[in-house]
Image (spheres, grey):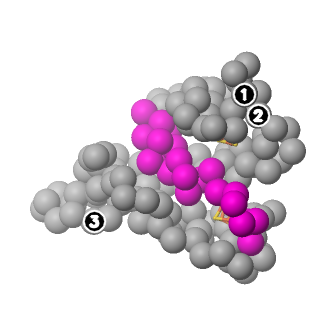
Amino acid sequence: MFGCEAPGDRRIELLTRHGKKGNGLNSYWELVQARICPKCYSGDKRGNCMISAGSECSLRAFLPEIVTTINNIHSHSYQAYVEALRNNVCINCDVRRPDGTCWKREALECALDRYYPLVIETVERVKADVRNDRFVQTVS
Ligand code: SF4
Ligand code: SF4
């Protein structure tokens, strides 16, 4: 079994209206772990990640890009989210072939691709907090 530590050292910070910093990326990751990992085909259904050694979860690897992309979308079209994620996230992924296709997507091996709707919903939940002035978000 492999741990599901919070993603790397890149940071998305959520600032309260009073300027107090929160670790925003960890907040997103905690929501991902609570909402997606227990359903994940690569997990043990209790929230623990069982992804094979040498593999990396695309949600974890690209969480900052995923969050930034979804937060910049203002559309009711699900397809708009999918296209933006493919353009902003998959483009940075070593698994992507030059023609834009991806064997992990084809084999249902990519957690981002498998759980797009849940990922979008999870990030939108935090986005709603931002919209309601509970947070101001900065990315570094
Ligand atoms: S592969 Fe699945 S269980 Fe593992 S961290 Fe990613 S979403 Fe969670
Ligand atoms: S769908 Fe493929 S290219 Fe896109 S993040 Fe997943 S593994 Fe990478």
**SS at mark 2?**
loop
Q: Which residue is mark 1?
A: 97
Question: Which of labels 1 and 3 is toward the front?
Answer: 1
Residue 100 in magenta stretch: no
For disc 2, does the CB lie below 8 Å from ligand 2? yes
Residue at far front of view: 54
What amino acid type is highlighted by mark number 2? Answer: Cys
Q: Which residue is mark 2?
A: 102
In the picture provided, is 86 more to the left or to the right than 13? right
What amino acid type is highlighted by mark number 1? Answer: Arg
Above or below for 12 versus 95: below
Residue 111 placement (x, y as % from top left):
70, 53
Residue 11 placement (x, y as % from top left):
34, 54
- Residue plotted at (66% across, 48% down): 112
**SS at mark 1?**
loop
Label 1 and label 3: CA atoms lie apart by: 37 Å
Q: In this orientation, which residue lies closer to the viewer: 58 or 121?
A: 58
Residue 138 placement (x, y as % from top left):
27, 47
Q: Which residue is mark 3?
A: 22
Toward which corner of the image does residue 80 lie, by quadrant? top right
Label 2 and label 1: CA atoms lie apart by: 6 Å
Residue 67 placement (x, y as % from top left):
47, 46
Above or below for 97 versus 45: above
Residue 61 in magenta stretch: yes
Crowd tier of the residue under label 1, counting other residues whose Cα lies within 10 Å: few below 14, some 14–19, many 20 or above: few
Q: Quadrant of ligand 2?
A: top right
**SS at mark 3?**
strand
For disc 3, does the CB lie below 8 Å from ligand 1? no
